[in-house]
Image (spheres, helix red, strand yellow):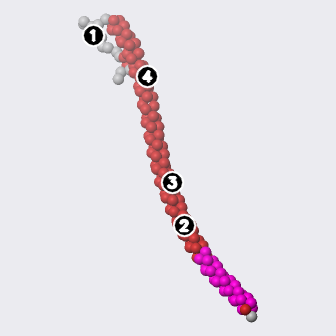
């Protein structure tokens, strides 16, 4: 691309016959150079803006990739925490079931022992009742025998 300086430094050969008026050519070149210089500067400014915008887009793309990675990591961590919580819940549930089963077995053993103890006490009471009854009958017989004599 030509620069405004290239246009300003351009030298034309002079024609011997039927050439252009040098002053008109130079005046026109000054006009062209002014417009071209303005366009050239605008073009450079726009290139700078495009580069800045491209850099901003690149930065936002990197930021987006970082956010995506963060979201992905957060999801992975959440899934890991959820899985760990489920495992812990299963462990707690299993432990509670085992403990409840053991307590139920202990209670059943205590009930059976209490029933055996009650039955033993009932038998002891029957035996005691029979002994007392026998003793009373023996005493009554003694009394009756003494009264008859």
Q: Position of residue 146 (x, y in %)?
A: 75, 91
Label 1 secondary element: loop
> Per the image, is 131 magenta?
yes
Q: Quadrant of the C terminus?
A: bottom right
Please identify the quarter of the rendering in which residue 127 is found: bottom right
Please report the residue visible at 73 percent of the width from the left and 92 percent of the height from the top. 148
Query: Of the residues tagged 1 and 3, which is closer to the observer?
Result: 3
Pick the front one: 53 or 19: 53
Query: Dot 1, crowdedness within 10 Å: few (<14), some or many (≥20)?
Result: few
> Eyeballing the image, is 28 above or below 72?
above
> Eyeballing the image, is 113 above or below 33?
below
Q: Which mark is residue 15?
A: 1
Mark closer to the chain start, 2 or 3: 3
What is the C-alpha distance between the residues marked 1 and 4?
39 Å
Q: Quadrant of the N terminus?
A: top left
> Eyeballing the image, is 138 above or below 74?
below
Please report the residue visible at 47 percent of the width from the left and 40 percent of the height from the top. 67
Chief SS of the magenta region:
helix
Q: Position of residue 107 (x, y in %)?
A: 57, 68
Q: Which mark is residue 45?
A: 4
Residue range highlighted in magenta: 118-147
> Eyeballing the image, is 141 above or below 39?
below
Label 4 secondary element: helix
What is the C-alpha distance between the residues marked 3 and 4?
58 Å
Q: Residue tagged by mark 3? A: 85
Mark closer to the chain start, 3 or 4: 4
> Per the image, is 93 magenta?
no
């Amino acid at each position: 691309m030509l620069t405004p300086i290239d246009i300003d430094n351009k030298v034309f050969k002079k024609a011997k016959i039927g050439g252009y008026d040098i002053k008109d050519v130079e005046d026109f070149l000054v006009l062209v150079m002014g417009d071209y210089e303005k366009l050239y500067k605008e073009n450079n400014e726009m290139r700078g803006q495009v580069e800045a915008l491209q850099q901003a887009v690149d930065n936002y793309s990197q930021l987006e990739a970082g956010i995506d990675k963060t979201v992905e990591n957060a999801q992975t961590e959440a899934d890991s925490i959820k899985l760990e919580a489920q495992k812990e819940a299963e462990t707690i549930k299993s432990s509670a079931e085992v403990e409840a089963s053991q307590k139920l077995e202990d209670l059943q053993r205590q009930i059976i022992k209490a029933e055996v103890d009650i039955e033993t006490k009932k038998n002891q009471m029957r035996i005691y009742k029979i002994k007392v009854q026998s003793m009373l009958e023996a005493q009554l017989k003694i009394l009756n025998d003494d009264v008859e004599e």
